[in-house]
Amino acid sequence: MAALMKKRVLAEFTQSQVITSEPPAKRLRTLRLSSTGGSKNGVGTEGSSSLAYIELLEKCKGGNDALQLLVRISDTVSYIPSEDVPLAVKKLAERYAVESEAAVRAKILWIFAELGEVTTDSAEKAHIVNETATFLKTEESHRVKSQGLATLLKLGDYHRSIVLQTAREHLPDTWHGVQTRCLMIIGRYLSVNAAEEMLALVGNYSHSQDPRVRAQAFETMAELHSLRGCRLPASFFSEACEALRDDYEIVRPAVLKIIWLLGKEYPDNLLPGGDGEEQRMVDCAFSRICALMGDLSPRVRAAAMSLLGTMKGVSRRYIEQALDKKQKRVEDEGSEVEERSASCGAFIHGLEDEFLEVRTAAVEALCTLSLEQPAIARISLDFMVDMFNDEIQDVRIRAIESLRKISASVTLREDQLETILGALEDFSGEVREGLHATLAASRLATRNCLHMCVNRLLDNLTRYPQDKESIRSCLAALGASHPYLTLPLVPQLLGRHPFFDMPEPDVDEPSYASVLVLLFNAALHCPSMHALFTEHAAKHYHYLRDTMPHLVPRLKPTLTHGPNLGNKPVEDEKTRDIRGREFLERMVCGVEGARPGGRVHTQLLEAAAMDLDRLAEMDSTMEGAARFTALYIRCLLLLKSVVKELSISASSAASPDSDSNSANNVSALLEHTQKLQRLFSGLGETEMILANDVWLKALALELIRVTRSATGSALPLARHFLSEADALPQDSSKLPPFSKALALQLPSLAEAKPGTLTRLLLPLLLTLPLQGEEKLPRPSASTRLCRALIEEPRGDADAALKFTGGLLLGIPLTAKILNLRDPSTLRVKLRHPDQQVQLLLPRKSDLKLQGSEENDYRLRTTVLLSHQVWMEACNVEISLALLVPSSSVCNHASLDDPCVIDLCKPTKVSIAPKAIKRGI
């Protein structure tokens, strides 16, 4: 029996293989070759397969077979070339006209929507809309109508009149799916002129028996009000308040949006209250939304709380009532006000809710209202601090960020600060770093608060040494914002004895250096503090000023305790920046004025690159500009070397060693040019033009090398080079000589073949520029270099990480990426002991922006790796890199891939996969 089943399975498998390899699929595969050259990635094969399935659709007689083919078509429809979309639409429309199965017709309409996104022709998109609308006129199936309306909803921008007319015709349909689709189309594509008359029609569907239709009717009215210019009347407010009693939770959030919009549109309209007192509409809307904090659905409660935070112009007493569970009384009348009873303790209920979505929304809403009204920030401070003890980490992080935002309006007391400092013991590094940033922006009430904060931060530094930079930045900010609270603590913090001289502390000890960072930042705003510093502190100031210039400010007058410390001239920061800029300018002018070509010019370029590297190490302000110029000069040196090798190989037979050396140099040149374009931000137009010019030269050299080699095709590389050259600007007056020659000569090229391009490019590369013609970049001081700092793992651990062979090992990775332009290109690079390289894509949630002004990111993720059993422990190198978007022409090995740009030196982690321990 088993043998018989095996034969049947093999027979079915063989039959399925025969279907996929039929002659039509093989014949259609050539259609992709004339469109693009990207078939190397499998795009052409997928598009041809989809067209083959569409042709096979004509031969299907049953609905099930047709549906299976349509499923395969839907999987590959995105790869269909744009020029083949009309043929596909025609074939599918013919099948729709004769199809009796509703499921097949619905699937065809779904594919219509996908084809509309694939094609780039607006006329073809409009044609798909017309075909769909025509089919819906005679369609009887509700589900097919719903799918057809979904297609019109996606492509409605290309024929709005037909789409709206179709939606009006099918709006009286009895099925909820058709009605909701029609309402969505009306809300998205209705014009301003016809909006008034449609508003009443849509309003009638808010009383529909189906809750899904009611919810969509309210959402459509909200969309018409906010996006289509059709204003809801103020009289609709009472009807919306009645709709809040709807039994279905999908309706109530839509009604909340209506009430919020009306309160925002007519804030000062007066409404009659329960006891005869008139009430502003925005206050009434606030109370109505607060009343839903007792709703049974957490989705409704979260939506209500989110809307509360965005309401502006609400009277202060209503917000204060929402922060107090006890009913407040009006001072004049001495009686409870019924209109405010609904908002009683709404924020407290939200902060104490059992669902984290509601608590998170409550924290954010309270933060938004506190930023609008500073008086509310002082009232809500205690509640915000209490959220630091929440059991969910995300809620704690939101509370920490919210407190940092409102810190300018509040002053922390000792009891509040004690609760905040208790969260410093959190195991999560993200929570601790957020607390450091919050404390840095906070204002403390007393000297005891500052002393307690400093002591807890130093204890935190002892427990978590990896937080050193974050803690020192926090202490620097605390010292700068509280100089006169720091003044009486100087003797205590420095450990001064009133009678005896104490031994000199070790400046390399982290706690002592952190205390000095606090004191020196406070001394910048309190000159009288200088007299309290010991002689050791004065000497250590100059050391820390040189090693940590970003944390230790320049004090005026400079500390001069000790011999000969006051005689040393102090250079101003602005003067030093000017000198660094002048040095860079003199060096660039000297290189440009030299005669190009020859050994002296090469030696001059090498010396300039080394001097620029030293400038980048000494001057942090000019680091980006110096690194960019030095890298550009090294590209010129590699260009000279490769061009010289190519000229020698052209005149004589090249040896295998020279070919290998040339390939390595070209690969290094491609990597350097990629760094010029990807690693630096803040570049000017001239620098970007020069970087693109040297990139084109590197591509030209790669094309010439591949063309001359005996293996491999250079046609994809030629196409890639032409596509890059087409991006050159039309105005060639500002272009360098090589790019200018390309812009002038490429349009007159007869055929774009590798050999023809090689004969054109080689003379351009061999031509030496005239003296003074070759320009070097002069980047500004605002140029920034992208680099990464790995904080964890540290790489100095002696013990190997042991795990069971074949299973996963998680290595925590914490890093800071500075000046990252595109976060989507960041990768975690793993180099295994066998020299295999693996690139891992970190999750978006693991990469968070540090500041709003700069592109600095913090990465906290877990690197997962697995190996079989090893005989002994080996090192795995972990680093961060940028994966440059490359075309299909990149064929370099993983070890020297120029498309992978390293951002830091790798950190070695010793791992030891062990065998499974089997029990007795």
Image (cartoon, grey):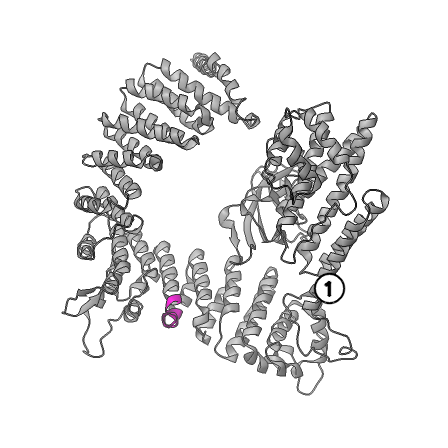
Query: How far from the left and from the top, in percent, is residue 205?
Result: 19, 43
For residue 813, side relative to residue 344 (left or right):
right
Tag 1 secondary structure: helix
Judge by depth and name the residue closer to the eye, 210 or 868. Answer: 210
Q: Amino acid at mark 1?
A: Arg
Instruction: Please state the total of marks drawn on the protein image.
Output: 1
- Residue 874 visible in image: no
Query: How far from the left and from the top, in percent, is residue 172?
Result: 18, 36
Query: How far from the left and from the top, in percent, is residue 870?
Result: 66, 38
* Residue furthest to the right: 599
Q: Residue at x 28, y 36 (%)?
A: 161
Judge by depth and name the residue closer to the eye, 70 or 692. Answer: 692
Q: Residue at x 18, y 44 (%)?
A: 201
Query: How far from the left and from the top, in percent, is residue 334?
Result: 19, 78
Range drawn in magenta: 371-381
Q: Which residue is mark 1?
A: 579
Q: Residue at x 72, y 83 (%)?
A: 501
* Residue furthest to the bottom: 499
